Image (cartoon, grey):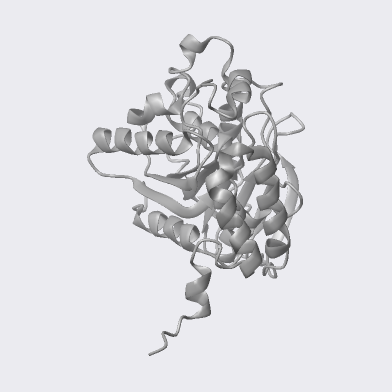
Amino acid sequence: MVSMVREDEIAQEPFGALEPEQRRRMLELGPRWNDDIVGHRKAVIDCYTPVVAAAPKHGIRVEREIAYGPHARQVLDVFDPAPVCGEGAPREAVLFVHGGAFVRGSKSVNGEIYDNVCHWFARQGFIAVNVEYRLADEAPWPGGAEDVALALAWVREHAARWRIDASRVFLIGHSAGGAHAASCLFDPALAGAVAPGSVAGLVLISARLFADVDPRNPNAGPVRQYFGDDESRYAERSPLTHAACAEVPVMIAVAEYENRFLDGYGAAFFLAVLRHRGVPPRFVQMRGHNHTSIVAHFNSGEEVLGREILAFMATVPRGT
């Protein structure tokens, strides 16, 4: 008997929304990810850019380059899924913080990649905010975390303008952006930077949760540039050290093929929060995916991680 597999089921396989040749290339790239993370990152972006460029975006208004601070990089984009005149019910919001190893990156790499994350959430009915932040050359530790805190303050201040439910803002950080997101919420050095109740839940995707300059770390140089030359201070400046301070609900996602050590740090953060609370945070490993495709695939037709995040958000009680 022939088994009939629906097209939408195939799309939920790793890279299942891609053409067969592209899917084969992405699957082959994974085990070799750490051989050349810069080159492989480019390959993933080149693969996904035309796919997400062709994805549905109708009905979403994007207002770009809104200043949340005085620096040129302290800007954000707002993706509004249903702009209407008059009154409307407040909507949940997502604030996304991109990666870039602390020293590079932008909220919109090429007009498509990281915009795709916000387009996908806007299609689910969220107000989605894409955040730029200062880099390590101008704002070493804790500059990135301070910028995330400022962006959260901007969202809270302008919630009425965008019809955002200020009690339902979810913070999502990828890679270095995950480090900044976790630090701004949990690091005692930034206590008071974020107003109570500003974040309903935190999603850490392939986040740099511990500062290390291990020679096997492909981003050891950028880590040093952001966290400083004094390695004796790395532990106290690392989000992992402050996991027990995590009071907001947390979800952690890692790729099967990560920048070296990031999956281990994600798992350690999970265990630290579990020991602290006794209630496990949500933990997801994206089979087949790598450090870049784990976000580049959003709005491509593959929705496994997106649906896991929505399920996590649904478990967060109102008023948390």
Where residue 150 appears, as percent x and y from the top left, is: 60, 33
- Depicted 247 relative to depicted 3: above or below: above
Looking at the picture, does residue 318 appear above or below residue 175? below
Q: Nearer the viewer, residue 85 or 39?
A: 39
Q: From the viewer's perspective, is 32 left or right of 278? A: right
> Horizontal placement of 221 versus 75: left or right?
left
**Count of numbered circles on the image:** 0
Residue at image location 75% in from the left, 49% down from the top: 64
Q: Is residue 145 left or right of residue 47?
A: left
Q: Closest to the observer: 44 or 240?
A: 44
Furthest-bottom residue in this view: 1
Q: Position of residue 296 (x, y in %)?
A: 62, 53
Specify the farthest residue to the left: 278
Q: Is residue 50 left or right of residue 180?
A: right
* Residue sitting nearer the eye, 153 or 106: 106
Q: Which quadrant would residue 57 be assigned to in this image?
A: bottom right
Q: Position of residue 85 (x, y in %)?
A: 67, 66
Q: Is residue 171 shown above or below 7?
A: above
In this orientation, does residue 127 appear? no
At which x and y percent is residue 83? 66, 64
Instruction: Classify residue 58 by image quadrant.
Output: bottom right
